[in-house]
Image (cartoon, rainbow, N blue to C red):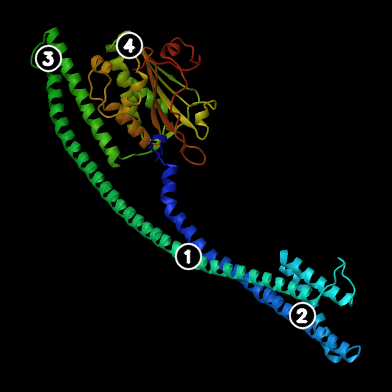
Amino acid sequence: MHLADRPVTFRGGIWISLTPVVAAVIALAVLAAVPWTTNWRLTRVRLDIAESLAPARQLVQDITAALALELAARNQAARDGTHGTAGYDAAAVVERERDSALGALGPRLGGNLAVDIARFRALIAQWHAQDGSMSATGTPVALTDVVAAANHLDSALVSRRAQQMRRIRSLENVDVLVPSVFVPILVVVLLAVFWTGRRMAALARDAERSRLALAFAAEQRVTLLRGLTHDLKNSLGAASGFATLLRDETSGPLTPLQRDQVTRITRIIDETITSVEDALTVARTEAGTLPVRRHQEDLRALALESASDYLAAAERAGLTLTVEFSEELPPVETDSSLVSKIIGNLLSNAIKYTPRGGRVWLRASAPPAWDQLNEAGPWAVVEVCDTGPGIPGALREKVFDEFFRAPSATIAAGGEGIGLAMSRRVARLLGGDVTLESEEGWGATFALWLPVPSEGGASLTPPPKVLPHRRAADMFNGAALPATVPRSPPMQ
């Protein structure tokens, strides 16, 4: 595929087309992740309540009750004059067990609760140790102080439990809210994807209908042009035959003026036939019906044959036609008739638009490795250079459009502006291209690029967009010509 024929893609368009898919993936990921995350967090909160807060409250209550029993047993022993009772010992055992368990829960509860538990246990220890003595602060620790600490710790545990319950309700709300939000989004995305798919299918059907309509129109155009060409060629061929009879003075002698007029008539008829054939070739190329018969061809022979066909035309126009070849010109795998048609068209244009006294140069070569644009495959090139007026930069690509003619070209010579369009399209059909390098006032160089078969097959890399910069005057002065290339104006 040639560079100019490659489809253009826009990254923004790709992202726009992927937006529904990305949104759907995100929605599905959220819907899948939120329940797992919420369930994990709920489990941790519920475990905190069930395995830490509730046991801690129960332990505080049990310790408070045991301390009350211990105090009652102590007071009873004091009244009875004894030193201990079984009730006191049993309550003390329960109190120590519960106190140890509460101490183990402190690190798990953490924060202020751990501090309150440590303070509560310290007061219990002081109450047991004082036996009527003073506390470290100089104030005796009464059971009411321990009970107050127990109530404060129980209130903190209740507050912590209420906080955890609020977290549970919040997580449960999230577990309900997220599907409520993302399921509609996912539904909308799926509807958008469905609508986009239907729209794309409709566009594809429209594109296919348009393609078939264009193909049918191209076929109809080819059929019309083929019929028109046949009729025109018959009529113009007959007119050319009569003009030839007149020129050969079959019906009587002609004056010099009449002979010149008949010659002009013959040339106009021939040019018209060529234009009609070129239009048919362009149409067949567009429709894909132009047959290509590839054979291994010698590009030197094709170039010489084409040059010999136009040598007389160059002499009549007062021009010098020079033909040169590279010594190492490889054979090409191509259609010789189509290549000859392209070279002939380029030579015809060069002769037509070059002023009398100018020169036309035909050169066939294989570009050397220094051409950085030719890095991936071998190419052969046929260059047709002239010393004509050149082509302005703004028109260098437009000259390859159908029926386009530059204003200066319209004044300089006749024609329908179909030859270059035909040449480029046929060249691309052959796997090559036709390029132009020109400076206004310094002539023009048209180049036909043809792929050279390599060991792995024909080159598929597009040819260079422009030729290495060489002005026609430089080439004709011999600055760019090797001394050993054969020259051939003396062609028979």
Q: Which of marks 1 and 3 is nearer the N terminus?
A: 1
- Mark 1 secondary-structure assignment: helix
Mark 2 Cα shell of 10 Å, populated few (<14), some (14-19), many (≥20): many
Q: Earlier in the sequence, mark 3 or mark 4?
A: 3
Seen at 23% across and 43% down, the residue is 219
Relative to residue 21, is residue 420 depicted above or below?
A: above
- Mark 4 secondary-structure assignment: loop
Residue underneath mark 3: 249
- Mark 4 or mark 2: which is in front? 2
Relative to residue 252, is residue 182 depicted above or below?
A: below
Q: Observer-nearest residue: 415 or 147?
A: 147
Q: Earlier in the sequence, mark 1 or mark 4?
A: 1
Residue underneath mark 4: 319
Distance from the alpha carbon under mark 4 to that under mark 2: 124 Å
Distance from the alpha carbon under mark 3 to that under mark 2: 143 Å
Picture quadrant of residue 351: top left
Q: Which amino acid does label 2 sit on?
A: Ile
Residue underneath mark 2: 63
Residue underneath mark 1: 177
Q: What residue type is labelled 3?
A: Glu
